[in-house]
Image (cartoon, rainbow, N blue to C red):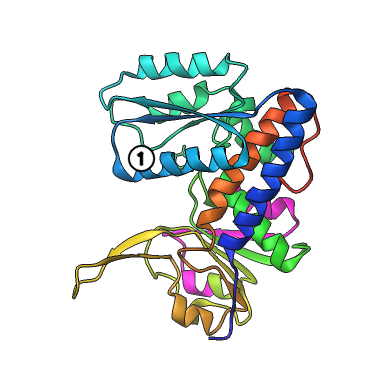
Amino acid sequence: MSAAIIDGKAFAARLRARIGEEVAAFRAAEGVTPGLAVVLVGEDPASQVYVRNKGKACAAAGIEGFEHRLDADTSEEALLALVARLNSDPAVHGILVQLPLPPQIDPGRVLEAIAPEKDVDGFHISNVGRLNTGQPGLVPCTPLGCLMLLRDRLGDLSGAEAVVVGRSNIVGKPMAQLLLRDNATVTIAHSRSRDLAAICRRAEILVAAVGRPGMITGDWLRPGATVMDVGINRVTEPETGTTRLEGDVEFESAAAVAGAITPVPGGVGPMTIACLLANTLSAACRAQGRAVPAGLTA
Ligand code: GUN
C-alpha cells in the first residue's frame, strides 16, 4: 500500500469540537440555543440507529435535539402538519425528516414542505437551485463533508480533473456542483456511462457514490489520485455469515495506486453527522442575522 489514509473520523471529531465552541459562543451572544428537529416515521432499524446518533451528536455539541417518532402507518397529512408546526417553531433552526419514508408518504412533497432556511439536509428545491447558481444556502451534508476533506488534503482544487461516479440527488449531483464551484473540471459518470474505467482513469479526484461494494478497483485509478469512497455497503461473507462494511472502492488494490484514499468505515461517513451539526449552526446564525463562522459552509 502506498496511499495516505484520509482519516475522516479524526477530522470529523475536530470539526465537532470546533462546532461545540461556536455553539457556546452563539448561545452566550444571542441567548438562544440552536435546535435540530429529527423526524422518524416507522421502525426501520438502520434509521433508528442514525436518529439516535444524531441526537447524541447534538447533545455533545450543545445543540438542542427534538426527536419526533411517528408510527409506520402515519398519514402524509399528519407528517405535513408536523413539518408545518416545526417550520413555525422559533426554537427549531433545523429540520431533518429521516429517509426512507413508508410507501403511503411521498418524500418529494414532504421535503418541499420544509422551510428552506431550516432544510439542514439541503434537499429542498430552493437549496438545490441556490447551490447550482452559486448563492449561499444549505448544502447536503455528505458532499459538504467530502469537500472539506478534499480541501484539507489538496488545498486549492482549481483546474483539478474530478470524476464523480453516481448521479444521486443526495450525493452525486451536489458533489459535482461543489467541485465546480471550487473550479475543478468535473465529469459525472454513472451506470450507463460508456467505458467507466477509462473515465475514472482521468481523475485526479475520484468520488465514488454508487452503492456497489468494491466496484472501483485499483486498475481504474490514475496513479496518485485522491479517492473519496462514499459507499457504505453491508456485505455478508459467504463462508462465515459475518457482515462487514465495504465501500464502493476495492480498498487494497486502490490503495496501491492512489495517492490518498478514505477508508470505509472511518472516512467520509463520520463527516455526514458533523456537517449536519454545521448546517444546524449555520441555519441558527442566519435566523439571528449573524455571520456563519468560517469553514462551516461551502
Ligand atoms: N437517510 C439516510 N441518509 C439520510 C440523510 O442524509 N438525510 C435524511 N433525511 N435521511 C437519510
- Image coordinates of residue 191 in percent, x first then y, are 42, 59
- Label 1 sits on a secondary structure element that is helix
Q: Position of residue 27 (x, y in %)?
A: 72, 29
Q: Residue at x 39, y 70 (%)?
A: 214
Residue 192 is covered by the magenta coloring = yes
Of 256 and 292, the residue lying toward us = 292
Q: Is residue 261 magenta?
A: no
**Mark 1 residue's CB less than 8 Å from ligand 1:** no
Residue located at (43% from left, 74% from top)? 250
Relative to 244, 160 lies left or right: right
Q: Is residue 250 above or below residue 181?
A: below
Percent of width and height locating residue 43: 28, 35
Q: Is residue 151 visible?
A: yes
Q: Quadrant of residue 186?
A: bottom right
Image vertical order of residue 278 relative to residue 224, above or below: above
Q: Quadrant of ligand 1?
A: top left
Tell me where the magenta segment starts and ends, as one range: 173-198
Give the crowd class for mark 1: few <14, some 14-19, many >=20 residues within 10 Å: some
Q: Left of 275 or right of it: where is 265? A: left
State the image quarter where residue 241 is shown: bottom left
Q: Is residue 202 visible?
A: no
Seen in the picture, residue 168 relative to 94 is either above or below; the reply is below
Going by the numbered disc 1, the residue's amino acid type is Gln
User: Which residue is drawn at the image coordinates 36% and 27% (left, top)?
Assistant: 69
Residue 173 percent location from the top left of the image: 56, 48
Residue carrying label 1: 48
